[in-house]
Image: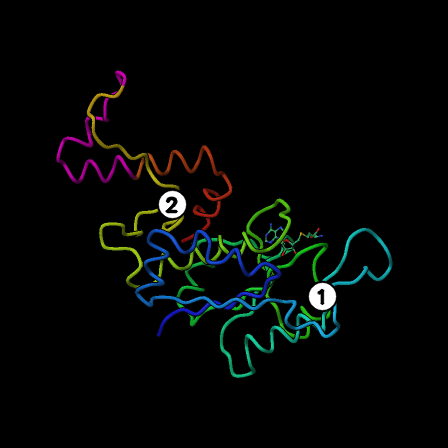
Amino acid sequence: MSFHASIITLFPDIFPGPLGTSVIGRGMEKGAWSLQTHFLRDYASDKHRTVDDTPSGGGAGMVLRADILAAALDDAAPEHDQRPKILMSPRGKPLTQALVRDLARGPGAVLVCGRFEGVDQRVIEARNLEEISIGDYVLAGGEVAAMVLLEAVVRLLPGVLGAAESHADESFENGLLEYPQYTRPQDFEGREIPDVLTSGDHGRIEKWRRDQSEALTRERRPDLWAGMQQKP
Ligand code: SAH
């Protein structure tokens, strides 16, 4: 079973974009995941292929129409489709590594990329869209946000990263930020690699890394650190 992403967008040409390169792109070539775009204008019914209209109640900008988005969703994900239907949205649940891991365990995702002022609330409710945000800032559209989500998910799929690029130790995997990394040369502009890392003493190395991770997390991300302290 491989992970299948369906993307509803006004800009299908920008996919796969960065998702076609490096380990993520090779993962697609190997069949670990696949991607299909659905061009929202194909679901419009008038000759101008209109997908948006002015906001009810007034105000600036345009809103994506519920009926057109619903037609695209019903085509991308028929009733038996088990994949979560996600709307990229600054109002959504924050994307976290825990959420990414959940998605990577599933059969895929249907991702709606908003544009303009957003989408009609009724399609969010009628099609049970889960809103997900990639951070507290506003983008011009959901496409880059969908790519961020997919890149994070796909690298966790079986067979995508080799053993050499394992993710067990990474930032967030254990609730902590990652420790500092070093490689040759031994001396860089007078800065040495910390002695412990070249000592060969695996117990000391592990303890040093753990201490560094904890100190970094406490200093940079008191929110993550507080969450860690609450866990049993
Ligand atoms: N008026 C909206 C913002 C619309 S931005 C508001 O104030 O909430 C246009 C589209 O970009 C959104 O529909 C969404 O799909 C996408 N987008 C913008 N910021 C995003 C974010 N932080 N995370 C995920 N998607 C985002």
Residue drawn at the location 54% of the way across and 65% of the way down: 7
Q: Residue at 52% across / 66% down in the picture?
A: 37
- The magenta-colored residue range is 189-209
* Label 1 CA crowd tier, 10 Å (few <14, some 14–19, many 20+): many
Residue at the limit of the structure toward the top, as seen here: 190
| Residue drawn at point x = 37 percent, y = 52 percent | 21
**Mark linked to residue 51:** 1
Hey, which residue is sitting farthest bottom in the picture? 80
Quarter of the image with the N terminus is bottom left
Asked which secondary structure carries label 2, the reply is loop
Please determine whether, in this image, residue 224 is positioned above or below residue 21.
above
Residue type marked 1: Val
Counting from the top left corner in percent of width and height, residue 159 is at 28, 62
Tell me which corner region of the image, top left, top right, bottom left or bottom right, holds residue 201: top left
Mark 2, Cα crowd under 10 Å, few <14 / some 14-19 / many 20+, is some
Check disc 2 and give the amino acid type: Ser
* Vertical comparison of 160 with 124: above or below: above
Quarter occupied by residue 131: bottom right
Left or right, 19 with respect to 182, comes to: right
Residue 157 percent across, percent down from the top left: 35, 62
Number of numbered discs overlaid on the protein picture: 2
Q: CA distance from mark 1 to mark 2?
A: 40 Å
The residue under label 2 is: 171
Q: In the rendered view, would you say 82 is above or below 39?
A: below
